[in-house]
């Protein structure tokens, strides 16, 4: 019951975080990776200790390109002894030329780990698809919840359950996005197609969680129907949250364990992916317990007033 | 009771068999070895865009064009002896319509992009198009046009699509002009091409038929009469010894297969073998640690049922891995991450059941009833929450543009479906097998969960 009673505090925390995220998203925006922008990315590793950034930059800047890549590329240390070089979309000969220059000293034993070139049109397609999938997932989930909860239209109609889930979902998704806007601005974290996947998984996980709590409310409402001393809606929701509390926490914990292991010990390629998931699943659990069901109570109260 | 235990034993035996299948097929000769994606194995991925914009053809024609494209490229790669290449055609999706098609070429083990690009780039595309009857007017418009877009629009109208393309080519050979001694490339169409060529030439006597090679116009002879027998000649560009050489390599390339439409390289990706090896090791390590951590948590918190959940989880893992092998699913780093995530979520079904069971026990029910009731009540939550996960996975699978995301979605989808299945079968059977209606204090303790409040 404590959770329902102090719901305004929880709303405040969420609103604060969401607003902060939206501000950082609109001020800095997400740093788009080559998956979306198009471009060339070259990951290479030295067989010996890597030279400083300036040394490698010096090598690259003496190259004669038309148009030049000077000033419009990034060179970031990566892993133990490697670098990731990102430039505009290079043609095949340009790329070969660049790789040859980097590799000019055989004593450095350079190994090219990953070379990736994505054309601008492909990048545009990926962006469109990413946006469309997110919107589609949201729409489908509202429809599904409206359907699954069609038998509990009193006192709150079933489409409102769907709407609330989407509100909670947006919350779960905006916060990790905001975090990545901050990380992108200060640490140069880029978002790629895997980032979009992570966002969609958060959607899936969080809705999973929210449905379990709603399902309990649905059951308790059904049981209390026809009861003369029926409890108030607020009490029923509060009880439902309490009853599912341990389960929500335990499920999130086990999932977080799994994701944490991928983050700590998994391959470099899925590091950022698991970081987004960690943040998203944490807030997903938070919103299922502290926000979604509480919103049901708020809506019910609002309906009574009107 | 005995029947329940009998089923539980069968279940465990079958799972052991599945586990053995997964384990034993991991030697190098089995065809059921895990299929690893390029990011784990090392290799090259090339993505080409098929330029269909100029071919105003029906969806069916586009499909045959793309099929020919795939076959030709496949044949060419096989000549170079790359092991297990994957060549597939993908529609770019709902935004682009039918005219946006991609050809994705995956070459495991190949890390030299230049060689790979050159190998495929040598495949010529061949198209025959009719010069528009409004050509004169159009070329005047072209001069007047200011923007590039406008020019492109007009240029597209200059030629009419005939359907005569490289896919109808039977063979090609080098010939020399009797009088000038200049080299020519002679083309012979197959039966279908013969008929089409005759029809097009018959209907368009007096007009010009342009021959396009790799999107460039090579020559534009006037059609004097209906041409039967399906023969054509590309000439006028091959003078001198350099010309002969060029004509000869063109003939060779045409004989290896000509593309019905030009293709353009839009993305390349190369992954070194060592990077892949590291990614596999890291993924396996992460997976094992995740499993151990989850198991310890379940057993400490839920005691005996927790142990059963761990067994159910092992069964879940075995079934999943077996499915990956049987379909087969190409595993990528993101796919493995998806699998580890799905293990975490598969636990959820068990937790839901246990929590419900605990509540029923608190209400003073007998252990046996509590198990049955707990399961029945948890089922609705399991069903509805997993349905929403399935919706997400399906959307990801069908609308994603990269193989990275597709790999993840497929694994995740399989994971969710299998987790529902094991919740109904494994978790339930095991719980029912172990319950005892005359439960002693020990068993009650073992079924108790969490810490006393």
Image (cartoon, grey):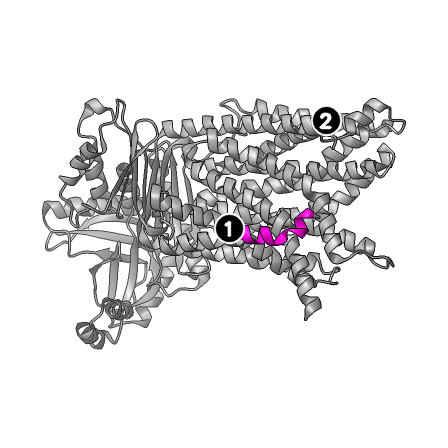
Q: Which residues are magenta?
A: A2-14
A287 on left or right of A78:
right
Q: Secondary structure at mark 1?
A: helix
Quadrant of the image containing the C terminus of chain B: top right
> Callout 2: residue from which chain?
B
Could you tell me which residue is drawn at 24 percent across and 73 percent down?
B206
- The quadrant in which residue B81 appears is top left
A150 on left or right of B341:
right
- The quadrant in which residue B85 appears is top left
How many residues crowd mark 1 within 10 Å: few (<14), some (14–19), many (20+)?
Answer: many
Residue B119 rendering spot, x and y as whole percentages: 29, 40
Residue B420 rendering spot, x and y as whole percentages: 68, 41
Query: What residue sits right under mark 2 in the picture?
Result: B303
Can you see residue B168?
Answer: no
Residue A102 rendering spot, x and y as whole percentages: 20, 33
Query: What residue sits right under mark 1 in the picture?
Result: A173
> Callout 1: residue from which chain?
A
């Amino acid at each position: 019951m404590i959770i329902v009673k102090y719901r305004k505090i929880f709303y405040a925390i969420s609103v604060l975080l969401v607003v902060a995220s939206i501000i950082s998203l609109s001020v800095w925006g997400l740093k788009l990776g080559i998956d979306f922008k198009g471009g060339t990315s070259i990951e290479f590793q030295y067989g010996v200790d890597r030279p400083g950034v300036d040394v490698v930059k010096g090598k690259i800047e003496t190259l004669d390109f038309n148009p030049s890549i000077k000033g419009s590329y990034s060179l970031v240390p990566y892993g133990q002894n490697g670098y990731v070089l990102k430039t505009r979309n290079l043609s095949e000969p340009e790329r070969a030329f660049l790789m040859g220059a980097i590799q000019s000293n055989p004593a450095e034993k350079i190994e090219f780990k990953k070379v990736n070139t994505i054309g601008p049109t492909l990048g545009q397609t990926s962006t469109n698809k990413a946006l469309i999938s997110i919107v589609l997932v949201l729409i489908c989930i509202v429809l599904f919840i409206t359907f699954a909860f069609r038998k509990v239209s009193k006192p709150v109609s079933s489409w409102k359950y769907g709407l609330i889930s989407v509100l909670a979902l947006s919350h779960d998704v905006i916060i990790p996005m905001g975090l990545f806007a901050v990380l992108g601005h200060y640490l140069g974290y880029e978002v790629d197609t895997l980032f979009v996947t992570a966002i969609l998984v958060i959607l899936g996980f969080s809705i999973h969680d929210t449905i379990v709590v709603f399902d309990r409310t649905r059951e308790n409402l059904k049981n209390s129907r026809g009861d003369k001393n029926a409890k108030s809606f607020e009490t029923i929701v509060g009880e439902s949250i309490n009853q599912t509390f341990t389960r929500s926490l335990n499920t999130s914990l086990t999932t977080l364990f799994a994701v944490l292991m991928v983050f700590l010990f998994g391959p470099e390629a899925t590091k950022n992916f698991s970081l987004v998931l960690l943040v998203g699943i944490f807030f997903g659990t938070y919103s299922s317990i502290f926000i979604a069901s509480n919103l049901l109570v708020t809506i019910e109260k609002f309906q009574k007033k009107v | 009771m005995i029947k329940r235990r009998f089923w539980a034993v069968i279940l465990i035996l079958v799972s052991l068999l599945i586990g053995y299948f997964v384990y034993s097929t991991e030697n190098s000769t089995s065809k059921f070895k895990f299929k690893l994606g390029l990011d784990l194995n090392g290799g090259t991925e090339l993505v080409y865009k098929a330029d269909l914009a100029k071919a105003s053809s029906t969806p069916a024609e586009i499909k045959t064009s793309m099929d020919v494209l795939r076959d030709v490229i496949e044949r060419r790669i096989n000549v170079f002896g790359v092991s297990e290449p994957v060549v597939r055609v993908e529609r770019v999706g709902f935004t682009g319509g039918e005219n946006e098609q991609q050809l994705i070429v995956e070459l495991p083990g190949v890390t030299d992009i230049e060689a790979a690009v050159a190998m495929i780039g040598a495949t010529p595309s061949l198209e025959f198009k009719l010069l528009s009857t409004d050509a004169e007017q159009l070329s005047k418009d072209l001069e007047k046009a200011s923007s590039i877009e406008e020019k492109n629009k007009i240029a597209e109208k200059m030629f009419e699509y005939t359907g005569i393309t490289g896919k109808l080519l039977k063979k090609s050979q080098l010939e020399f002009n009797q009088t000038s001694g200049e080299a020519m490339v002679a083309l012979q169409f197959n039966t279908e091409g013969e008929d089409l060529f005759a029809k097009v030439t018959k209907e368009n006597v007096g007009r010009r038929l342009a021959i396009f090679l790799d999107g460039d116009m090579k020559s534009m002879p006037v059609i004097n009469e209906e041409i039967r027998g399906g023969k054509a000649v590309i000439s006028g560009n091959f003078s001198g010894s350099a010309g002969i050489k060029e004509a000869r390599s063109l003939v060779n390339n045409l004989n290896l297969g000509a593309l019905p439409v030009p293709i353009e390289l839009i993305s390349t990706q190369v992954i070194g073998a060592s990077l892949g090896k590291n990614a596999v090791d890291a993924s396996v390590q992460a997976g094992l640690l995740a499993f151990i951590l989850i198991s310890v948590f379940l057993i400490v918190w839920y005691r005996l049922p927790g142990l059963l959940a761990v067994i159910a989880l092992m069964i879940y893992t075995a079934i999943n891995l077996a499915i990956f092998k049987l379909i087969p699913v190409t595993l990528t780093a993101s796919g493995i991450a998806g699998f580890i995530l799905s293990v975490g979520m598969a636990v959820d079904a068990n937790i839901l059941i246990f929590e419900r069971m605990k509540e029923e026990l608190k209400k003073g029910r007998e252990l046996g009833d509590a198990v049955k009731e707990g399961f029945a009540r948890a089922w609705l939550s399991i069903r509805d929450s997993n349905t929403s996960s399935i919706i997400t996975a399906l959307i990801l699978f069908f609308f994603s543009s990269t193989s990275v995301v597709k790999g993840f979605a497929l694994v995740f989808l399989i994971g969710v479906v299998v987790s529902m299945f094991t919740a109904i079968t494994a978790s339930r059977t095991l719980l029912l097998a172990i319950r005892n209606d005359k439960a002693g204090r020990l068993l009650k303790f073992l079924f108790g969960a969490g810490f006393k409040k």
